[in-house]
Structure formats: C-alpha cells, structure tokens
C-alpha cells in the first residue's frame, strides 16, 4: 500500500472515530441534561411539598383556643377541658354531663379542622394521636389507665358521630405519670394531649 493510501486510510479512520466520539459525547451531554432536569424538578416538588406541610401545620396550630392550648415546644395541643376521673377509673360514664358535652364540642372542633384542611388539600394524610395522662395518686397501673382513658375518649367521640375521615389515621397512647409535658399541679394531669400531624403525600405538579 502506498504512503498516500495509508495516510488517506488513517485520516478516514480518524474522522470516523472523532465523529463517533462526538455523537457519544452528545448523547452523554443530553443524558446529563435530562438527569439534572429531573433532579431539579424533584427538589422543587419536595420544596413545594414541605411548604404545603408547614402551611397546614400553622393552620392546625391555630385550632380553637376555647378548647385547646398549643405547646410549641412539644408540638402538641393540650385539651383544656379539666377531666376528673375517679381514682383507677377510665369510663366516660364517671365524668359529669357538662364535661362530656365540652369534650364532645372539642371533638367536633378537631373534626371540622381536619375536614376543612382535607378539602383544601385532599392529597395530604393526617395522623391524630390521642394521648392520655394520669396524676400521681399511688394507683399502681396508671400507665395502663392513661391508655384506657384515651381509648375511652376516642370511642366517646366515635359514638357521638365524630369522625375524622379516610385521610386521618387515629392512634391511641398513654403516658401515665411519665413524660416531660406535665402540669405542676398533679390533679391537672388527668387530661388529654392531642397531636395532629400532617403526613407527606403526593402533590400534583402545577401545569
């Protein structure tokens, strides 16, 4: 093969190689652009979701102060209705009529608040924690008792026609005489704490 033919073959091969590399780099560049776009869109969606959750939290924190006091440190609502159970008792039948009516009104407040925010944000889920507490009165099963009282309140609301919708999961808990969120007057610790938590869900992207 002559020298001119060898050089021609070399430059032809070199040109083909550079063209192939160019297309490879072009494909890689386009792939990177697509991946970056998806990443940016994902971050924007998470930011929008976070802002929506924070907006809902603020709305829930402003729940009717007639029945609830919000504790920003523990992010829980104190049910302000004073409930005086007899020692060792958890049945709502042991509570006077006026207190029962106030508890019922408080339940309607929670239901209406959750239903209202659900209508505005149907994609958001909620976790409603009903926590019972107990006063230190030498009763040996106050932890179990506080749970039973929270369960009794949940059933009382349900029997009163108070429901929180399919977007809300209800959890029952009892902290007994423990925990850090307690009143300095032991008698006042016969109360309920309510924790409403909006849960992360799918938020439709704006078109």
Image (spheres, helix red, strand yellow):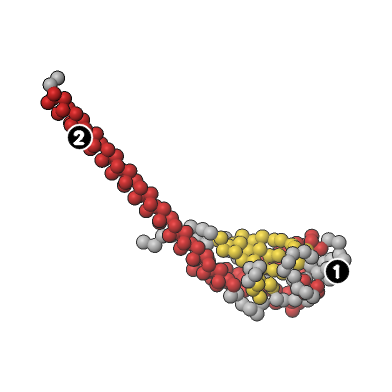
Mark toward the viewer: 2 or 1: 2
Label 2 – label 1 distance at C-alpha: 91 Å
Q: Secondary structure at mark 2?
A: helix
- Residue at 24 percent across and 37 percent down: it is 18
Q: Position of residue 123 (x, y in %)?
A: 50, 61
- Residue at 79 percent across and 67 percent down: it is 134
Quarter of the C terminus within the rendering: bottom left
> Is 22 left or right of 142, judged from the image as shown?
left
Q: Position of residue 79 (x, y in %)?
A: 69, 73
Q: Is residue 98 above or below residue 118?
A: below
Q: In the rendering, which numbered label is found on residue 15? A: 2
Q: Position of residue 159 (x, y in %)?
A: 69, 66
> Is 102 left or right of 45, judged from the image as shown?
right
> Is 51 left or right of 82, judged from the image as shown?
left
List the single residue furthest toward the front.
Answer: 3
Where does label 1 land, which residue? 137
Q: Nearer the viewer, residue 27 or 140?
A: 27
- Residue at 61 percent across and 61 percent down: it is 127
Residue contact between numbered discs 2 and 1, judged by CB atoms under 8 Å? no
Do we see residue 167 in this rendering? no
Q: Secondary structure at mark 1?
A: loop
Q: Is residue 187 above or below residue 207?
A: below
Quarter of the rendering containing residue 23: top left
């Amino acid at each position: 093969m002559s020298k001119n033919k060898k050089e021609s073959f070399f430059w032809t091969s070199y040109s083909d190689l550079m063209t192939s590399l160019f297309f490879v780099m072009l494909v890689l560049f386009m792939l990177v652009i697509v991946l970056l776009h998806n990443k940016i869109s994902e971050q924007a969606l998470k930011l929008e979701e976070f802002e929506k959750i924070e907006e809902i939290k603020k709305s829930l924190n402003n729940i009717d102060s007639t029945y609830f006091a919000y504790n920003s440190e523990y992010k829980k609502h104190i049910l302000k209705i004073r409930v005086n159970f007899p020692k060792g008792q958890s049945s709502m039948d042991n509570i006077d009529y006026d207190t029962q009516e106030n508890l019922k009104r408080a339940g309607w407040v929670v239901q209406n608040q959750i239903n209202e925010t659900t209508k505005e944000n149907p994609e958001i889920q909620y976790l409603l924690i009903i926590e019972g507490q107990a006063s230190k009165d030498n009763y040996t099963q106050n932890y179990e008792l506080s749970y039973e009282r929270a369960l009794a309140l949940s059933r009382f609301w349900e029997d009163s026609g108070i429901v929180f919708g399919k977007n809300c999961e209800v959890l029952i808990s009892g902290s007994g005489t423990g925990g850090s969120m307690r009143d300095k007057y032991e008698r006042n610790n016969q109360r309920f704490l309510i924790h409403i938590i909006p849960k992360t869900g799918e938020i439709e992207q704006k078109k």
